[in-house]
Amino acid sequence: DAGVIQSPRHEVTEMGQEVTLRCKPISGHNSLFWYRQTMMRGLELLIYFNNNVPIDDSGMPEDRFSAKMPNASFSTLKIQPSEPRDSAVYFCASSLVGWTGRRDQPQHFGDGTRLSIL
Amino acid sequence: AQKITQTQPGMFVQEKEAVTLDCTYDTSDPSYGLFWYKQPSSGEMIFLIYQGSYDQQNATEGRYSLNFQKARKSANLVISASQLGDSAMYFCAIQTGGFKTIFGAGTRLFVKA
């Protein structure tokens, strides 16, 4: 079975450029999460979706960050304009969570995108 | 608000010995789930084990077990018979209502040959 697929695996770009990270969740999962991991701040939840609807974006650091989930099999995280402090590993994860509030479903993570902003 | 605390930034263990990684949590929600994940140096996040707040027994998965003490709000991970491949970062996480999952800062485990 295919896991969560993220692309690209690595991205190096110059400050000010637009960056788009992509994620394909596991088929059948109804929740999708975007995380950022840095040495200083650890693993931070940026935003999560349920049934393609953004539920909580309070972790998105600034207006430069935006995320979309146009359908159940695709999500993007966009940074525009990018800055050196955005350099991090960005993870996408998916899980099967219902409105009944089941809390026993683990999140399945993609391999991450290592982003470097010069 | 939920909170996860992992007080051990780094731990050493001799190969074939058992090791306990500490995790304490705080939440006002009576229903919650606790998870442990492993992150090897290659970077991927691997789900290890789950414990529900209403589970009567401690969770076990192979060499992994969870020492769940609800009154003390702790969910320590026990790895038995450590192997060199267990060297990694380990994260404790809590999930409550609303899908949100909060991760701890992690503990880096070093297994010595």
Image (spheres, coloured by chain):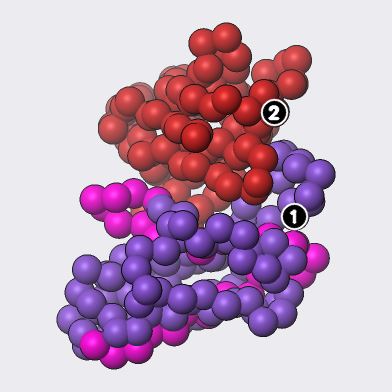
Chain colours: A purple, B red
Please name the residue shown 44% across and 32% down the image.
B4
**Label 2 in the same subunit as label 1:** no
Please name the residue shown 67% across and 24% down the image.
B30
Q: Does the stretch in magenta take in A17?
A: yes
**Disc 2 target residue:** B31
Q: Secondary structure at mark 1?
A: loop
Q: Amino acid at mark 2?
A: Ser
Query: The C terminus of chain A is located in which quarter?
Result: bottom left
Magenta residues (range): A16-43
Residue A97 appearing in the image:
yes
Indicate the quadrant where residue B10 lies: top left
Residue B7 horizontal/vertical position (percent): 33, 25
Query: The N terminus of chain A is located in which quarter?
Result: bottom right
In three-dimensional space, the C-alpha distance between marks 2 and 1, rounded to whole angstroms, equals: 17 Å
Nearest to the observer: residue A70 or residue B109: A70
B91 relative to B68, above or below? below
B10 sits to left or right of B27: left
Indicate the quadrant where residue A79 lies: bottom left
Residue A77 horizontal/vertical position (percent): 48, 76
Please name the residue shown 29% across and 90% down the image.
A17
Marker disc for residue A96: 1
Q: Amino acid at mark 1?
A: Leu
